[in-house]
Amino acid sequence: MSRRYTGTSGRALASMGSVADTLRAISYRLIHEAGPHGMTALEVVKASGRDRWGIQPRISELVTAKSVVDSGQTRLNPSGRSAIVWVVAEHGPEGGAA
């Protein structure tokens, strides 16, 4: 099955990369600025004023890239569940060592 892209869908696809890049940069900046205290994904969502479904995948991408790491700590989110506290790699348990 092949896909046919119209000019509109092609432009939409191209713009997704820049939106994801922007949201990834916002997420990283907020987590970086939080220092060793770090942030949960929902804290990043709240601080950014962006949609959860746009931010959470960007945090996952930052984790995959090893730009942010699990701090080893959790905080309760508004629903009462424990959430991972993310920090930039230099503040992680390994001190940025890969």
Image (cartoon, grey):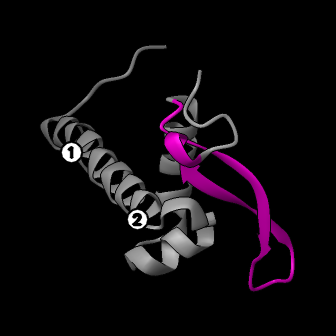
Determine if residue 51 is in view.
yes
Residue 74 percent across, percent down from the top left: 79, 64
Q: Is residue 50 left or right of residue 42?
A: left
Instruction: Look at the image and give the residue range highlighted in magenta.
Output: 66-91
The image quadrant of residue 10 is top left
Quadrant where the C terminus sits is top right
* View extreme (front): residue: 95
Measured as percent of width and height from the top left, residue 13 is found at 27, 38
Q: What residue is pinned by disc 2?
A: 30
Cα–Cα gap, marks 2 and 1: 23 Å
Query: Given the image, on which type of amino acid does mark 2 rest?
Result: Leu
Q: Residues within 10 Å of mark 1 (few under 14, many from 20)?
A: few
Query: What amino acid is at disc 1?
Result: Ser
Tell me which label, 2 or 1, sits earlier in the chain: 1
In percent of width and height, residue 5 lies at 25, 29
Q: Secondary structure at mark 1?
A: helix
Dot 1 corresponds to which residue? 15
Where's residue 87, x and y in %? 56, 53
Looking at the image, residue 32 lies above or below residue 10: below
Q: Is residue 40 magenta?
A: no
Q: Residue at x 46, y 71 (%)?
A: 51
Q: Name the residue at the top extreme.
A: 1
Q: Is residue 55 left or right of residue 38?
A: left
